[in-house]
Image (tube, helix red, strand yellow):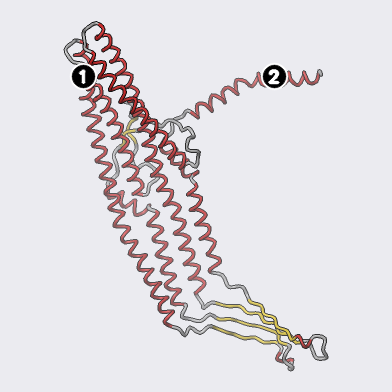
């Protein structure tokens, strides 16, 4: 009994001595859980957790495993034949044993190896293609995740403000300074904002479900709040981005590998006009003459049906031509894609500047003027509500323009083939 009490006392003492460190660790974990989610963090998590990446990697591994299968010698063949009537008889036991090995014409195995290797390389580049696509989707979803939080905050501010205005109108109505129409107008606007609140909650759950699906998580798993989006700086010149795209896009690398595979396959089709050799060695005791027991031989196929081989060559050459022209077409479309995405980013930046630098200050000044006039008894309640509504709506449009700019930037980064941001942010968007 004393030993049990002593052990319990030691455990309590240990916990009391380590309580500060445990509290610090707990607070640290809580702090990490509350850290805002950034776009780059989300991309990193998606690329490490999305099951489509595993599918693409398994496909590449399967393709890579075919290289040795298709470029190795066939297994040697062993044949055994016996004369059953010689078993237990006075004559010698008659049997025949033969082993053979097929040897492809010189260069065929190398071409098969090259074709399979280039096909495996193309499959490997498809992993990067998928990663680039998932990166663009994750960035776009992060932008939506940011906007729905900003829209919710603005909607909450507007609802609080209108509730205060309604209380003011009720006081004015009770003293006979205003009509009941002011209160009714406020009630209508509040009801509309409450409907907007429900819609935003639904959108938030939808976006969260999309992000969690990318992360291979339960759709309703909680997500951290998004980090603030920052104003985008100056982009590189369009020519530099197009050159970078030609070097970085994994689709182009996959096409180059496909072209190499098609060329090797075309050369292999020409080699198929030459016969494969079959070497043989055997022992045959069926012959009475012992000098004839051991035999060696050679065999080969006869490529007599040239129509079949010419068709094989034509198919291989056509596939090679198809791959080369596909590359030419992709390069043309790639340059167009970069140009269009580049122009969309600039357009979004101009729209953002218009709302943020011109329309928002005007809306804010109009709201302040309407509020001053109403307090001084010079303005009407409807003008006050509309001006405040326009002010907060303009703030929402600024956030929408910022979100669209980041979406367009994500499209440009995907077009260029860049996982990292193309432009360093200038400042945090905390002014709104």
Q: Position of residue 106 (x, y in %)?
A: 51, 77
Is 303 placed left or right of 409 in the picture? right
- State the SS at label 2: helix
Which residue is at the far top? 175
Quote the CA–CA distance across marks 1 and 2: 67 Å
Image spot of residue 372 (x, y percent): 21, 14
Label 1, residues with CA under 10 Å away: few <14, some 14-19, many ≥20: some
Q: In the shown orientation, is residue 119 left or right of residue 377?
A: right
- Which residue is painted at 24% across and 33% down in the image? 353
For marks 1 and 2 on the same chain, the one whose residue lies earlier in the sequence? 2
Residue 100, how many percent across, how many down?
63, 79
Of residues 256 and 326, the one drawn nearer to the viewer in this rendering: 326
290 above or below 182?
Answer: below
Dot label at residue 382: 1
Residue at image point 48% right, 83% down: 303
Where is 51 relative to 386, above or below?
A: below
Q: Quadrant of the C terminus?
A: top left
Q: Is residue 60 left or right of residue 428?
A: right
Q: Secondary structure at mark 1?
A: helix
Residue 308, percent from left and from top: 43, 79
Q: Answer above or below: position of 109 versus 304.
A: above
**How many labels, in total?**
2
Q: Which residue is mark 2?
A: 12
Location of residue 98 by image quarter: bottom right
């Amino acid at each position: 009994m004393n030993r049990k009490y002593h052990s319990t006392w030691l455990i309590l003492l240990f916990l009391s001595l380590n309580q500060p460190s445990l509290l610090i660790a707990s607070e640290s974990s809580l702090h990490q859980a509350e850290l805002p989610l950034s776009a780059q963090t989300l991309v990193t998590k998606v690329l490490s957790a999305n099951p489509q990446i595993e599918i693409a990697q398994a496909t590449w591994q399967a393709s890579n495993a075919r290289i040795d299968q298709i470029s190795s010698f066939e297994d040697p063949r062993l044949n055994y034949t016996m004369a059953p009537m010689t078993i237990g008889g006075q004559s010698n036991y008659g049997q025949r044993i033969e082993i053979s090995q097929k040897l492809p014409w010189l260069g065929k195995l190398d071409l098969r190896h090259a074709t399979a290797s280039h096909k495996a390389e193309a499959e490997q580049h498809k992993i990067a293609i998928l990663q680039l696509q998932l990166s663009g989707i994750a960035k776009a979803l992060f932008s939506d995740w940011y906007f729905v939080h900003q829209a919710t905050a603005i909607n909450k501010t507007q609802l609080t403000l209108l509730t205060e205005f309604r209380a003011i109108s009720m006081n004015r109505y009770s003293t006979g300074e205003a009509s009941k129409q002011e209160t009714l107008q406020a009630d209508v606007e509040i009801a509309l904002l409450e409907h907007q609140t429900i819609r935003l909650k639904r959108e938030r759950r939808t976006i969260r479900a999309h992000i969690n699906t990318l992360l291979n998580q339960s759709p309703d798993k909680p997500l951290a709040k998004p980090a603030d989006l920052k104003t985008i700086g100056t982009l590189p010149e369009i020519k530099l981005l197009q050159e970078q795209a030609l070097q970085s896009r994994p689709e182009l690398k996959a096409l180059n590998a496909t072209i190499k595979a098609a060329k090797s396959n075309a050369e292999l089709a020409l080699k198929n006009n030459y016969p494969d050799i079959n070497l043989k060695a055997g022992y045959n005791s069926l012959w009475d003459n012992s000098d004839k027991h051991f035999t060696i031989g050679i065999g080969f196929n006869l490529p007599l049906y040239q129509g079949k081989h010419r068709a094989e060559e034509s198919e291989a050459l056509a596939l090679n031509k198809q791959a080369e022209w596909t590359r030419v077409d992709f390069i043309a479309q790639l340059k167009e894609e970069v140009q269009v995405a580049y122009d969309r980013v600039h357009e979004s930046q101009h729209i953002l500047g218009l709302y943020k630098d011109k329309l928002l200050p005007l809306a804010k000044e109009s709201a302040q003027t309407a509020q001053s006039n109403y307090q001084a008894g010079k303005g009407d309640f409807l003008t006050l509500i509309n001006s405040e509504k326009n002010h907060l709506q303009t703030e929402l449009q600024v956030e929408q323009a910022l979100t669209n700019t980041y979406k367009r930037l994500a499209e440009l980064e995907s077009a260029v083939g860049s996982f990292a941001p193309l432009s360093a942010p200038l400042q945090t968007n905390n002014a709104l």
